Amino acid sequence: MVSMITLFLLCSTLSVNLICFATDDTITPNKLLRDGDTIVSKGGTFAFGFFSPGNSHKRYVGIWFNKVSIQTVVWVANRDNPTNSSSSWVVKIGNRGNLVISDGNSSNQVWSTNISILISDYINSSTMYYKLLDSGNLVLYDKNRRDFLWQSFDDATDTFLPGMKLGQNRKSGSNWSFTSWKSPDDPSTGDFTVIMDLMESPEVVTKKGSQKIWRSGPWNGVEWNGVSRMRPTNIIYNMVSNPDEIYFSYSDTDNSVISRRVLDYLGFVRKQTWDQSKGKWNTWRSHSDGDCDKYGKCGAFGNCQSNYDRICSCLPGFEFQSPKGSQSCVRKRELSCGKGDGFLKLEKMKLPDTSNARVDMSLGVEECEIKCRNNCSCTGYSSAYVNGSGCLTWLGDLVDVREFSKGGQDLFVRVDAIELENSGRHSKGSSLAKKKLVLLCVLVVVGFLISISAVNYFFKRSTRKRGLLQRQRLQRQVLNLRSSETNKETNSKFELPIFDLNSMMISTENFSMANKLGEGGFGSVYKGSLPDGREIAVKRLSKNSGQGVIEFKNEVELIAKLQHRNLVQIIGCCIDEEEKMLIYEYMPNKSLDFLLFDQTRCKSLDWKMRYDIIFGIARGVLYLHQDSRLRIIHRDIKASNILLDAKMNPKISDFGMARIFESDQSQANTTRVVGTYGYMAPEYAMDGLFSVKSDVFSFGVLLLEIISGEKNSGFYHEDPTMNLMKHAWELWKDGRILELIDPSMGNSFLEEEVVRFIQVGILCVQEKAKDRPTMSDVIFMLRNETPIPSLKQPAFVFTSNPDSTNAFAGSTPSLNELSITTVEGR
């Protein structure tokens, strides 16, 4: 009781405008934080306040996991300037909005955010406040602005959390990195730092002072080449490089998992996940303490092999330099550039240090060999990405090479003619290749003759076999023709059931009206049933369909190669003279637009259901852009192309207009603009430029439609020039964004959550492609309470008077869930 009275009197003597306890997630100008007080993020995930690490009696201010029984600090403000245990120290907002740690009885400061220069235009600190987010990020906001002014994520200590960046802000020149503690009891700046080495092919490196002690290997399009088994199933990795910034980040798709990456005081990056049942951290090292993980262990042109008694050997064409036992490798013989030398392939390799490498993402592996062969200084080459795209060439020593038991990439090392001959790979390889070529030619000729004979025999024998002949012709026409946008390997593995016309007529009861599901410009869709009981949807293209043979083959080949829970599954196809059909799994809940845009049926879509649909669509698009073995740009994402299964899981359909991108390709151009009015990005509709960002634009429009229940292209109200995007922007500017929400959802939603979704939707429809996020960024922003970049006016390129002449002559609006719409370029 006495202590409570004392505390009350102490608070009263400071100021009537200050309070002693900050019980929510913010620090405002009229609040201060004393030693012993904390603020906690809204979801209770993180806490901010004073602490003493381990056995230390020094006091620090930082952020730690609030739901973890073992205090685990993720960020320290005054790591190099601790305070004593005096209770007079406080955290408060000082001049120009800076957060400071000071002695409450004096002007003595031990730490400040020191951001006055950055926000010189905002000298009224009374409108500023700091908020602790559930991501672990402490963010400075201004009440008069929607974006943030400072964040702790830009000033990391030893911990790398989901959503943090590792790389460089190219505009400011500042680096995103993290540095170890001195010891478990001392958070001051330690000896080890993890940074991104910004070379032509960037790598993550750990340094002790200025000395490099470990590196990740280059980014291979999926993960860092030298970090085996990097990708757990619940983690999304993201590598971003543009004129403004280059960085690596990751996000957890499972919000229930508490995890972090921490650089310990010994120089190891550890992955940790919290085991609630055991009350402890499960810890894995991103790399072991084995000798092969030590940078340059075997020297230049050495190969580290951890499974051998002598872990260091020399690369082919090299030998240990005298005296015997030296770890330095030198060439056995000098090269005679262009006179018999060549390349030997080493598999499952950690690629050499890229400090002296050159990258050309426009070349494939075959062109890469030519480039390296024509440069006498080139000592080796490799594909930049695991899918075979991009070219990495080394112009000097090959350093920090190691061999994995699994994973890694192929490395081609330049050797002299004698080494090439002694290896037996050149001559045997050539001989084997010739034998394979001869065998292939024989098989092709024999197969051709047999096919011709069989066709003639069965045709003359009975016209009832015509269906079989049509299927054989289809297999030659659809399955064996090489698509210009796919490679040999994927075609060789492509298989798809072929159905004849009679079986489709039986399945659909002769395409009866009772089985008709919908109709559009392409033709009709019918419900059917296979002999094994499976229900199917038969997409029967009309003779006047905008989808021709090319688009039909494109959809058949693409969708059969893609496997994801949020992509519609194709069961087979059928071609019989002028009949072209696609057979899909049956979706009992039809398409999203069937429910969303109907005043009665939309009431069945509460916020939880719309939330799941949005995430399902986002996961499907992310798979197409990043996680599938083919990089796909859909080009026609819209409500009618989202089908719903029995459990209301969304599935993206209609791949007739999809295009394959090389993994390094950023955009492409077409003279034939395809898509649907209201969903097309401006750079695509106007100039034929499409990329992953044009799909992001379509997704943004669809997201706004799902939340509002309104069609973008049909949203006129009293203003014929108004579309949904413009309406959303006007409401956002006026602070009335909640008016956008579909009233049929009732009170089934959290306002802050829906507003965050709307923000992301507006961000996706920004006019310039570079201002839009990637789909991995979209998923992260939707799932996490993280600062969203400031919004600009979205593109209103589709705003037009519905009664006036359409600027995109020839466009056809979507009529049902499987339509294909074509817009010819002006």
Image: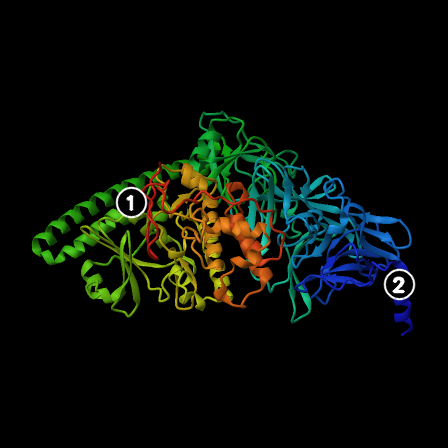
Q: Position of residue 178 (x, y in %)?
A: 70, 48
Task: Assign the C terminus to one quadrant of the image.
Answer: top left
Name the residue tied to disc 1.
550
Name the residue tied to disc 2.
12
Farthest residue, direction bottom = 1
Which numbered mark, 2 or 1, is in the foreground of this view? 2
Label 2 sits on a secondary structure element that is helix
Residue at 51% in and 66% down: 608
Image vertical order of residue 121 relative to residue 707, above or below: above
Q: Is residue 72 left or right of residue 691?
A: right
Q: CA distance from mark 2 to mark 1?
A: 79 Å
Q: Position of residue 393 (x, y in %)?
A: 52, 34
Work out whether mark 2 precedes mark 1 in sequence or the reverse, and give the earlier one. 2
The residue nearer to you, when weighing 206 against 250, is 250
Count the marks: how many?
2
Task: Assign the N terminus to one quadrant of the image.
Answer: bottom right
Q: Is residue 788 left or right of residue 601?
A: right
Regarding residue 229, the answer to whether it shows in the image is: no
